[in-house]
Image: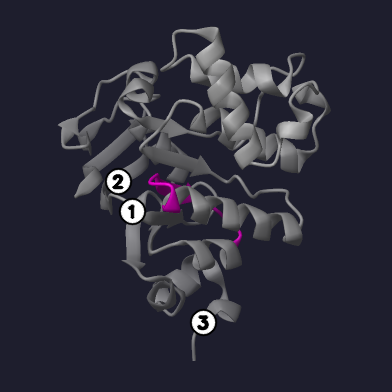
């Protein structure tokens, strides 16, 4: 089953076309990677899917339902959640408070929201920091908190926007395992990432965009060997001989 489909998705900002007739789909339970140079339109595509921007043209389907003009909070209740490239927690509030805000998307009672939030913090190895102010976390823990807040909404589809940016190699490896485990728990993952060893290790399928247009797609090994991808983005060291 296709959990997400983009059909000729196009987004214009005045005379600038940020996303140009983008077609892609994600199967339920899949990890799909979206890569491309800075300014390629990746985050704009995410923002259209998540309801931040309405598409200029084309259609977006989530669970078979057209969602072009849905608001982000309604999409969240339907099971579509996303993280942001620049994490902005409620810095003066506790880690637990931050996650509970997400839990109230589907929980009416404080006790239920707290219980769910504590389960998520334990899953992400943040339970011992639940009472720490979010602004005092390391960048790695803030990234985990960003995922925790999204997971608290109980998504079926999770959009991850560069959750590994700024992490050390060991932290990247830990994040890769976290994302793999999310898939095993039944969550479909759509991820933007610039760390190639991570995206290649994670993804079942990769889509590459450049100047808003799809230039390649396939399994990681195929994409890494694609001449257009190497020229536009990866660099010669990623070429497969």
Instruction: Give the crowd class for mark 2: few <14, some 14-19, many >=20 residues within 10 Å.
Output: many
Residue behind mark 1: 213
Let me know if residue 40 appears in the view: no
Instruction: Give the crowd class for mark 3: few <14, some 14-19, many >=20 residues within 10 Å.
Output: some
Residue lying farthest to the bottom in this orientation: 241
150 or 130: nearer the eye? 130
Q: Residue at x 41, y 72 (%)?
A: 223
Instruction: Give the crowd class for mark 1: few <14, some 14-19, many >=20 residues within 10 Å.
Output: many
Residue behind mark 2: 20
Across and down, in percent, residue 67 comes to 23, 27
Gap between marks 1 and 2 measured at Cα: 5 Å
Q: Earlier in the sequence, mark 2 or mark 3?
A: 2
Q: Element type at marker 3? A: loop
Residue contact between numbered discs 2 and 3, judged by CB atoms under 8 Å: no
Residue behind mark 3: 239
Indicate whether 63 appears above or below 196.
Answer: above
Residue contact between numbered discs 1 and 2, judged by CB atoms under 8 Å: yes
Q: Earlier in the sequence, mark 3 or mark 1?
A: 1
Indicate whether 218 appears above or below 167.
Answer: below
């Amino acid at each position: 089953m296709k959990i997400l489909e983009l059909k000729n998705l196009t987004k214009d900002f005045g005379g600038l076309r940020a996303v140009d007739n983008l077609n892609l789909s994600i199967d339920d339970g899949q990890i799909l990677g979206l890569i491309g140079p800075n300014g390629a339109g990746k985050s704009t595509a995410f923002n259209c899917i998540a309801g931040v921007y309405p598409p200029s043209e084309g259609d977006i389907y989530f669970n078979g339902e057209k969602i072009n003009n849905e608001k982000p909070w309604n999409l969240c209740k339907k099971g579509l959640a996303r993280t942001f490239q620049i994490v902005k927690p409620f810095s003066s509030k506790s880690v637990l408070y931050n996650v509970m805000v997400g839990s109230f998307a589907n929980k009416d009672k404080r006790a239920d929201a707290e219980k769910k939030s504590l389960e998520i913090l334990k899953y992400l190895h943040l339970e011992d920091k639940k009472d720490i102010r979010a602004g005092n976390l390391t960048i790695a823990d803030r990234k985990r908190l960003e995922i925790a807040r999204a997971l608290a909404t109980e998504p079926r589809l999770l959009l991850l926007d560069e959750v590994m940016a700024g992490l050390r190699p060991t932290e990247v490896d830990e994040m890769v395992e976290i994302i793999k485990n999310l898939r095993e728990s039944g969550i479909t993952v759509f991820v933007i990432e610039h760390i190639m060893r991570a995206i290649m290790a994670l993804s079942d399928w990769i889509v590459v965009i450049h100047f808003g247009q799809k230039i390649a797609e396939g399994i990681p090994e195929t994409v890494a060997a694609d001449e257009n991808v190497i020229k536009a983005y990866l660099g010669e060291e990623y070429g497969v001989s």
